């Protein structure tokens, strides 16, 4: 059970693991820094935030070394970390900011004009991370200042109206997950954690708040080439703990299907997508993995709620499913499987609700217990659970949960689009996002993609399109989504995917 006392004890332990260590905490090829160097920057950021508590602090920064210190300082000063990705379109970031009440931003890259204008209009404190590092004096953190219900961070997910939804997560919401991970995974000394995904993706919570507690080092992926095929990054940085979505492994498999991939990886933390058996087999046979873990969870429920340690026997035992099970609930998570097989989750990890009170229908109180309705279909086989897909139009692409209606809302704004429906197709083991469009007048798909790049993250932009004279209807007079998905040809795939 998470209490105010246990939250404060967690952060005391977290801080002592940093301020008393001379080990390497950051490794990016030849660029390396120690925990003591990070702690010094943390104290400077803490000084810059002096007098603030329980305030939303936007961090607009890349994966340079000082960014990690800034994240920890925001949380350890009992403020709320709001990650804002420089890789997101300005309009998307502005939609996120409009849902916050932040009057503080720390940046390490030049703020785009529209973002800068937003903060100036708010009369916000606009703080350069480089200036903080070079100019501020160190100031120690206060102790025993945390309440378990204070918000530690806010992540934003895709929303069905075309507007991202803010998910505030308290200390109580996420610490149970971290404690579980520390108890389950066989960490050793001097682990090197891959930092593959954007900070706005909640898989980052796993390595951010686990790595220091085991005296490990972060190794970020910063180059676009390494994001696509990260083999060089894995090998040269001697990664020992790999966290990613399975599609990254599938890309490696596609690129080097028969090769033996020699790495230092000891632990694989996979989540966000179904772990297909061809990928799992590749982990065992080609990457010589002994510790492969499949996790399942949602942003709204504290990162991960189920886990399963995969074995070679799974490939035979669960052959009828073709995917690894999500396993059993992590300690502290209570589940309910409804008559329609939808998974409900109740625990200290469940968020109190979305910013602005949006989408309250996602929560339900049953006999005095508050549940989060995941929208996922699950099935129990023997003593483990399998995730069988979604009830609605929400899908996972590269580990990111995406509302197809969100993408459709942006495409529908195009003057030459009369009707649109998005869906996902399998292509060589990867998920391909397709837009079925009924055009009105002249239509240029490449022009649409260029426009969407200014509004949406890259993983939400369709890679292929299908032009229809009319949308087929089902017996109820509604658009027949299943028929469109089933009948759609995929054209120019090589050109589109590249």
Image (cartoon, rainbow, N blue to C red):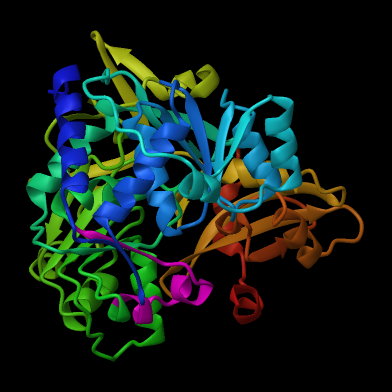
Image quadrant holding the C terminus, namely: bottom right
Between residue 293 and residue 161, name the one nearer to us. Answer: 293
Image quadrant holding the N terminus, namely: top left
Q: Residue furthest right?
A: 441
Between residue 105 and residue 344, name the one nearer to us. Answer: 105
Between residue 256 and residue 89, name the one nearer to us. Answer: 89
Q: Position of residue 297 (x, y in %)?
A: 30, 42
Q: Where is residue 11 in the image (x, y as percent from the top left)?
A: 21, 33
- Determine whether 276 is above or below 469 in the image: below
- Determine whether 219 is above or below 257 in the image: above
Confirm whether the magenta stretch covers residue 218.
Answer: yes
Residue 252 is left or right of residue 307, and the answer is right
- In this picture, which residue range is highlighted in magenta? 216-234
Q: Where is residue 205 in the image (x, y as percent from the top left)?
A: 32, 45
- Residue at left 61%, top 51%? 88
Residue 432 is left or right of residue 81, and the answer is right
């Amino acid at each position: 059970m998470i209490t105010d006392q246990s939250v404060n004890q967690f952060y005391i332990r977290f801080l002592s693991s940093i301020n008393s260590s001379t080990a390497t905490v950051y490794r990016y090829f030849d660029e390396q820094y120690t925990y003591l160097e990070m702690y010094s920057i943390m104290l400077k950021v803490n000084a810059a935030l002096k007098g603030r508590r329980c305030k939303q602090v936007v961090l607009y920064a890349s994966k340079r070394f000082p960014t990690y210190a800034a994240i920890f300082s925001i949380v350890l000063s009992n403020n709320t970390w709001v990650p804002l990705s420089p890789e997101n379109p300005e309009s998307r970031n502005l939609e996120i900011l409009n849902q916050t009440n932040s009057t503080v931003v720390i940046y390490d890259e030049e703020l785009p004009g529209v973002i800068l204008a937003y903060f100036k209009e708010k009369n916000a404190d606009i703080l350069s991370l480089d200036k903080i590092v070079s100019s501020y004096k160190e100031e120690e953190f206060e102790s025993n200042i945390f309440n378990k219900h204070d918000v530690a961070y806010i992540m934003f997910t895709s929303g069905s109206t075309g507007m991202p939804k803010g998910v505030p997560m308290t200390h109580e919401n996420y610490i149970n997950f971290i404690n579980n991970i520390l108890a389950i995974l066989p960490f050793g000394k001097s682990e090197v954690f891959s930092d593959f995904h954007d900070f706005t993706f909640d898989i980052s919570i796993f390595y951010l708040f686990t790595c220091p507690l085991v005296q490990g080092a972060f190794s970020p992926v910063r180059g676009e080439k390494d994001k696509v095929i990260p083999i060089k990054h894995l090998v040269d940085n001697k990664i020992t703990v790999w966290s990613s979505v399975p599609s990254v492994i599938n890309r490696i498999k596609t690129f080097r299907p028969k090769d033996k991939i020699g790495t230092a990886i000891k632990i694989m933390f996979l989540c966000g997508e179904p772990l297909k058996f061809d990928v799992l087999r590749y982990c065992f046979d080609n990457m010589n993995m002994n510790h492969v873990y499949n996790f399942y969870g949602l942003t709204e429920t504290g990162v991960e709620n189920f886990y399963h340690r995969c074995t070679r026997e799974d490939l035979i035992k669960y052959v009828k499913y073709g995917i690894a099970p999500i396993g059993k609930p992590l300690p502290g998570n209570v589940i309910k499987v409804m008559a329609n097989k939808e998974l409900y989750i109740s625990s200290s990890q469940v968020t109190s609700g979305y910013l602005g009170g949006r989408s309250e229908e996602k929560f339900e109180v049953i006999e005095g217990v508050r549940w989060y309705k995941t929208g996922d279909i699950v099935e129990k086989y023997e003593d483990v659970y399998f995730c069988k897909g979604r009830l609605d139009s929400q899908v996972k692409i590269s580990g990111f949960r995406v509302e197809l209606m969100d993408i459709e809302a942006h495409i529908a704004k195009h003057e030459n689009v009369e009707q649109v429906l998005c869906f996902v197709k399998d292509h060589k083991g990867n998920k391909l996002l397709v837009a079925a469009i009924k055009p009105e007048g002249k239509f240029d798909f490449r022009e649409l993609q260029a426009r969407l790049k200014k509004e949406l993250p890259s993983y939400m932009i369709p890679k292929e399109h299908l032009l229809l004279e009319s949308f087929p209807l089902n017996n109820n007079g509604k658009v027949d989504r299943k028929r469109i998905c089933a009948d759609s040809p995929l054209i120019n795939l090589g050109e589109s995917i590249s």
